[in-house]
Image (tube, helix red, strand yellow):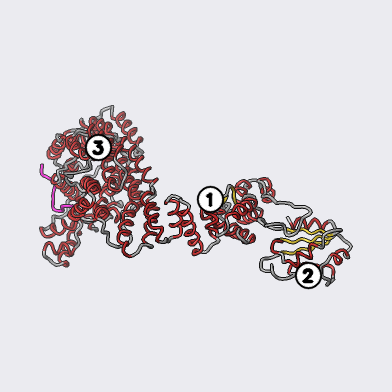
């Protein structure tokens, strides 16, 4: 504005003299006058001091312009006040707030921010004017900075980030401190709190905010745009910013603000004082954001006295489990409940039992919930005492009803549990188990709806561990519905949320789904087998499921002996645990498929009949599997009914495969209905995006078998069996009372005989052969 005024004065034939007062020269006597005298000497070749007579002697209109006049020294002000009159005009520019004008004014002009139209005129382009006006508030300096940063998004460029602190520094006084207080407080910027944080008297806050509003930086007592707020804070050093957050935390606490708001400031500061420890504890406990709760506990840990450190370590570990299922601190956890929560996933069965017993002694209610979670996770017997709540009774009934084939009761109990079970760390496995029980009860549609809702809740809470588990369950539901590509994508997402080591013994859940999905997709060299299972993983509820999935994977790769070994080991473990549940791991039909591959149809049919006769085989999905095996052993007539069972179970891919096999058989018989059946098969496959997967079935390109690998010696078999269960060479040597070198030699021969390269490829029982017919 001053530059435009000066240019117009010069165009009109006036003499224009200008000076800029600065804070540094505020106490230099005559500092502004010397700037004017130097200009006068340069333009008029006179060394005379500035005075009314000197200027009137120029015999031309004279305009004297002084910018930032609030910093002008007293002597210069005195002289400048004598110049006005006649052909001499004096123009002062000063910022607000100011106690008064530096000199009485004949006319006062208060500048206002640019309108959106004004911004467009400055930019020369109306396109970005709205966004630039929104960020800058119409402040001309910030508008120019945003223009210089183009094409960067408004507020994200370096010129803008430098311009905002520059505007504040030019004001000086209380303005930068008040702006910084407004920036750090955000929505908590009440005048009294702002005054306390900024260290200025409360009455000055409202005047300063009004001035900042007139410059387009503040609206309604708040920084008007997040980009401005970020730029204000970015202008501070890290130490200054931390100190500002600490002052804000204390001021908010003294003003009676809730712990959450105070804790946000403490977390931003990354430090706390003793008075803040109870505030951080309450905020962490009440927070619905797992990440924020962990940060509260981390800040508190840095401030606690030595005598309270262990309880702070335990509290941090409890918060971290929800976020990553692993404690990063590396210090031992002494709280029995927290230790048991970690132990369910990351210790063996005996260790977990000891930790659970300690938890139940310390906190019977929490211990009872964890014991129920343990029963779902490790295929342990249902606890004798569990929480006295309807959802807990429903949870205890799920497995007995599944084994009894009471699927409607299973669905009712599962939904009741999902409606009423409290969302908590110690109920995670219980809620996930209820979802899977719904799936086993042929209600994957309901399971998907409930899982979506639980996943949304976990996401809102920032509970990464919960999210990973529910995404893994989503994958299993998608697999049961025949959406194998979706299942694979979901598992990969779950393993990104929690890396494999963080899953502990629960790793068998996502890996079994991944194996099955890769098998269905024809990926016999996928990623699933490259993961190493932790000790005790095969003893979990999902261990047999993993063995079954690996058996199917081996069978698809035409490794029939390895597949048969895994199916039999799966069955042995399920029978021994009293959980012979075909809907979880149908090992009989898996073994039957291996027997069909090796030419033993009668033995295969007997296994299918045995499974079909079990009360636990009441689900349509299991019946479809049995009928498909019977079709392979006794003729294709069973395939049509198998497809109907798969349809009833909601598995379109399995139905499509059964119909494709039926179509192939009908075509071989010359039956004219083969084409119609093939069309129905493709329609089913299209529903789950898997039409391309039917090509092999319709062509009849099933693997035809290959020579079995050489049998292992007794010693090789013992070593291989222990290695397949996850034992190290040293552990195997100790158990078999041989040297580690001997173990290594045996494994080398086993790998060569079986044609494998990794321990993960070892079948669970390497020496087991298919049952004879």
Res. 360 visible in picture: yes
Question: Residue 400: image x %, image y %?
Answer: 18, 38
Q: Which is more toward the observer, 653 or 131? A: 131
Q: Which residue is mark 2?
A: 38
Counting residues from the start of the chain, the first of labels 3 and 2 encountered is: 2
Residue density around tag 2, few if under 14, some if 14–19, many if 20 or more, within 10 Å: some
Mark 3–mark 2 Cα distance, whole angstroms, equals 91 Å
Mark 1–mark 2 Cα distance, whole angstroms, equals 48 Å
Mark 1 secondary-structure assignment: loop
Q: Classify 574 as above or below 719.
A: above
Q: Which is more toward the observer, 510 or 721? A: 510
Q: Left of 131 or right of it: where is 103?
A: right
Residue 190's label in the rendered image is 1
Q: Which residue is mark 3?
A: 390
Q: Which residue is painted at 81% across and 69% down in the image?
A: 42
Q: Which residue is painted at 69% across and 69% down in the image?
A: 27
């Amino acid at each position: 504005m001053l530059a435009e005024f000066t240019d117009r004065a010069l165009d009109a034939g006036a003499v224009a003299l200008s000076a800029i007062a600065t804070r540094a020269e505020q106490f230099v006597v005559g500092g502004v006058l010397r700037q004017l005298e130097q200009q006068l000497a340069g333009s008029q070749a006179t060394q005379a001091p500035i005075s009314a007579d000197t200027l009137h002697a120029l015999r031309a209109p004279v305009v004297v312009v002084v910018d930032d006049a609030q910093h002008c020294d007293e002597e210069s002000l005195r002289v400048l006040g004598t110049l006005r009159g006649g052909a001499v005009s004096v123009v002062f520019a000063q910022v607000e707030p100011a106690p008064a004008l530096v000199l009485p004014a004949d006319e006062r002009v208060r500048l206002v921010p640019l309108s959106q139209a004004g911004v467009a005129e400055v930019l020369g382009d109306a396109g970005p004017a709205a966004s630039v006006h929104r960020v800058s508030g119409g402040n001309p300096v910030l508008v120019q900075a945003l223009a210089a940063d183009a094409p960067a998004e408004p507020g994200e460029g370096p010129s803008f980030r430098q311009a905002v602190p520059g505007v504040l520094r030019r004001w000086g006084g209380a303005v930068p401190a008040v702006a910084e207080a407004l920036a750090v407080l955000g929505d908590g910027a009440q005048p009294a709190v702002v005054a306390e944080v900024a260290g200025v008297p409360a009455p000055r806050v409202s005047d300063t905010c009004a001035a900042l509003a007139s410059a387009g930086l503040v609206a309604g007592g708040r920084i008007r745009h997040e980009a401005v707020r970020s730029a204000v804070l970015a202008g501070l050093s890290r130490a200054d910013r931390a100190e500002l957050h600490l002052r804000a935390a204390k001021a908010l606490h003294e003003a009676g603000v809730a712990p959450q708001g105070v804790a946000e400031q403490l977390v931003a500061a990354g430090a706390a004082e003793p008075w803040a420890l109870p505030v951080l504890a309450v905020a962490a406990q009440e927070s619905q954001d797992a990440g924020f709760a962990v940060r509260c506990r981390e800040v508190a840990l840095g401030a606690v006295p030595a005598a309270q450190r262990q309880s702070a370590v335990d509290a941090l570990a409890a918060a971290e489990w929800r976020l990553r299922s692993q404690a990063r601190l590396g210090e031992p956890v002494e709280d029995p409940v927290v230790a048991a929560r970690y132990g369910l996933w990351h210790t063996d069965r005996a260790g977990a039992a000891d930790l659970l017993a300690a938890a139940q002694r310390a906190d019977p209610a929490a211990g009872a919930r964890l014991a129920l979670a343990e029963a779902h996770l490790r295929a342990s017997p249902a606890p004798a005492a569990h929480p006295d709540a309807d959802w807990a009774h429903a949870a205890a009934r799920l497995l007995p009803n599944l084994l009894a084939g009471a699927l409607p009761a299973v669905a009712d109990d599962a939904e009741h549990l999902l409606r009423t079970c409290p969302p908590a760390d110690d109920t995670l496995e219980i809620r996930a188990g209820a979802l899977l029980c719904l799936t086993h009860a042929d209600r994957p549609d309901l399971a998907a709806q409930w899982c979506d809702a639980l996943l949304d809740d976990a996401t809102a809470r920032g509970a990464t561990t919960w999210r990973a588990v529910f995404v893994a369950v989503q994958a299993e539901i998608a697999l049961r519905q025949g959406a194998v590509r979706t299942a694979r994508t979901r598992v990969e997402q779950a393993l990104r949320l929690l890396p494999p080591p963080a899953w502990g013994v629960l790793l068998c859940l996502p890996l079994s789904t991944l194996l099955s999905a890769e098998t269905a997709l024809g990926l016999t060299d996928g990623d699933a087998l490259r993961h190493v299972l932790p000790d005790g993983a095969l003893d979990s509820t999902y261990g047999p499921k993993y063995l079954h999935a690996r058996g199917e994977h081996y069978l698809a790769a035409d490794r029939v002996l390895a597949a048969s070994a895994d199916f039999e080991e799966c069955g042995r473990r399920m029978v021994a645990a009293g959980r012979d549940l075909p809907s979880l791991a149908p090992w009989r039909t898996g073994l039957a498929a291996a027997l069909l591959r090796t030419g033993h149809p009668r033995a295969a049919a007997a296994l299918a009949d045995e499974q079909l006769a079990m009360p636990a085989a009441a689900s349509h999905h299991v019946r479809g599997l049995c009928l498909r095996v019977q079709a392979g052993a006794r003729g294709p007539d069973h395939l049509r009914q198998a497809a109907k069972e798969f349809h009833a179970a909601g598995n379109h891919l399995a139905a499509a495969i059964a119909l494709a096999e039926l179509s192939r058989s009908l075509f071989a018989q010359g039956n004219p209905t083969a084409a119609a059946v093939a069309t129905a098969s493709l329609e089913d496959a299209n529903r789950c995006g898997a039409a391309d997967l039917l090509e092999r079935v319709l062509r009849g390109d099933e693997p035809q078998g290959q020579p079995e690998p050489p049998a292992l010696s007794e010693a090789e078999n013992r070593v291989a069996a222990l290695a397949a269960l996850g034992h190290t060479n040293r552990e195997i040597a100790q158990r078999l009372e041989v040297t580690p070198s001997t173990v290594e030699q045996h494994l080398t021969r086993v790998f060569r005989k079986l044609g494998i390269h990794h321990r993960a490829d070892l079948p669970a029982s390497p020496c087991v052969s298919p049952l004879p017919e």
